Amino acid sequence: MVENKESTAKKATVPHKPTSDKPNNSRKPKPKPKVTNKRQAMLNTQKLAPFKYDMNEVLSASAMDPAKASAFLASVIAKASRLSTREAKEYAKTFLESGDLTKEEFDKVTRLMDKYSKYR
């Protein structure tokens, strides 16, 4: 029996590398593109204690319920330190519109936020 060249070529096997689940360590990972956010004024967390003290002075002189004032202060601190002081001022403005804060108290609160903020 005579075999042609094609059939012998098909029978020949090429050794292959065993596949593994590990990624190829010789390749460098792609650098992630830098996402730059615009700097915003945020509450300086290193001056949190004096900020709380001054805010409590303003809120204790206000006509706001003490339980509501405590929740208001916690929300202002959270918004000003995590989002921005602009967001915290908008939150405080809702209390001005609902009548819980007077215009003078609102101005004091916003001045305190500006005083204890830094750009980051």
Image (tube, rainbow, N blue to C red):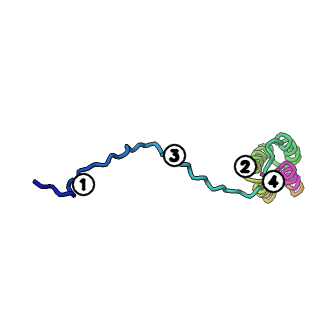
The magenta span reads 107-120
Give the side of residue 54 with respect to residue 16, left or right: right
Label 1 is placed on what type of residue? Ala
Residue at the location (67% across, 56% down)? 35
Disc 1 versus disc 2: nearer the observer:
1
Return the residue found at the far bottom.
Answer: 97
Number of numbered markers: 4
Q: Is residue 36 left or right of residue 42?
A: left
Circle 3 crowding by C-alpha within 10 Å: few under 14, some 14–19, many from 20: few
**Residue type, numbered disc 3:** Ser
Q: CA distance from mark 1 to mark 4?
A: 89 Å
**Residue on which disc 3 sits:** 26
Query: Are the residues flagged by discs 4 and 2 in contact, CB closer than 8 Å?
Result: no
Q: Which of pointers 2 and 3 lies earlier in the amino acid sequence?
A: 3
Please report the residue visible at 79 percent of the width from the left and 56 percent of the height from the top: 89
Q: Position of residue 78 (x, y in %)?
A: 74, 47
Question: Neighbour class for label 1 at 10 Å: few (<14), some, many (≥20)?
Answer: few
Tell me the kind of residue under disc 4. Asp
Residue 9, label in figure:
1
Which of pointers 2 and 3 indicates the residue nearer the eye?
Answer: 3
Mark 1 or mark 3: which comes first in sequence?
A: 1
| Prevailing secondary structure class for the magenta stretch in the rendered image | helix
Residue tagged 4: 100
Nearest to viewer (mark 3 / mark 4): 3
Q: Circle 1 — which element?
A: helix
Give the amino acid at mark 2.
Arg
Label ID, residue 82: 2
